[in-house]
Image: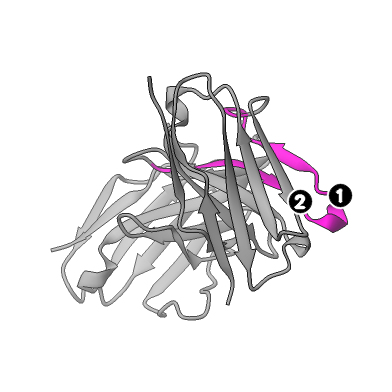
Amino acid sequence: EVQLVESGGGSVQPGGSLRLSCGASGIILSDYYMNWVRQAPGKGLEWVGRTRNKANSYTTEYAASVKGRFTISRDDSRNSVYLQMNSLKTEDTAVYYCAREGSYGGPDFHYWGQGTLVTVSS
Amino acid sequence: QSVLTQPPSASGTPGQRVTISCSGSSSNIGSNYVYWYQQFPGTAPKLLIYTNNQRPSGVPDRFSGSKSGTSASLAISGLRSEDEADYYCAAWDDSLSGPVFGGGTKLSVL
């Protein structure tokens, strides 16, 4: 059974940093593109970015709203993906989900984690 | 303001058929697959429909998807109280080089 578990959320002041983790079980993470998707309180879903798989050199892509501030990385030996968030803004407050991309590319997200809440507030 | 446009709410009575629309453009729905997600409060989204009209295993055939031009629809037949949830459409956007989502539709079963 595929399971994704996010961790690392919490409260941080504007301008601060936070690193989220997404641990995977039941899959070999290096085979898959992994995405981060967020949802602000009471709002809809917003794609944050993704890291391609080993076969595609682990390259990354980001939404314009986070480009230059957020970085996605992965450690396949730990079967984990990370989201490093710097220069955080109040509008980054959201539940952050990691999601495994399927055969058809984004947004073919068959598996999601339970999410971790990030609150950016002074 | 979401790239894909959905009605904020929809409703129906048990047993009824309801449809939820999703409007986009040539750079997203018009040229890429559409996906639908179901989300209950406090939980992660669940894939309901992929590649326009395919259901993952375990999704009842009461749920169906369709696409025409730059619009798509999710239909739910034989509506049940447990279908009360938020529904999101999604597609890849060639101009933005990433997935885009609709703003979500809150379905109420009266």
Q: Amino acid at mark 1?
A: Ser
Marks 2 and 1 in Cβ contact (< 8 Å): yes
Residue A31 % position (x, y): 77, 64
Q: Is residue B59 left or right of residue A17?
A: left
Are there few (<14), some (14-19), or many (20+) residues within 10 Å of tag 1? few
Query: For this rendering, which residue is in front, B37 or A89?
Result: A89
Of label 2 and label 1, which has the lower sequence position?
2
Residue A36 % position (x, y): 58, 46
Report the magenta residues as a range. A44-66
- Say what secondary structure mark 1 lies in: loop
Tell me if residue B26 can be seen.
Answer: no
- Say what secondary structure mark 2 lies in: loop
Measure the C-alpha gap from mark 2 to mark 1.
Answer: 7 Å
Chain of residue at mark 2: A
Q: Quadrant of the N terminus of chain B?
A: top left
Q: Is residue A58 left or right of residue B82?
A: right
Name the residue beneath numbered marker 1.
Answer: A57
Q: Is residue A30 left or right of residue A122?
A: right
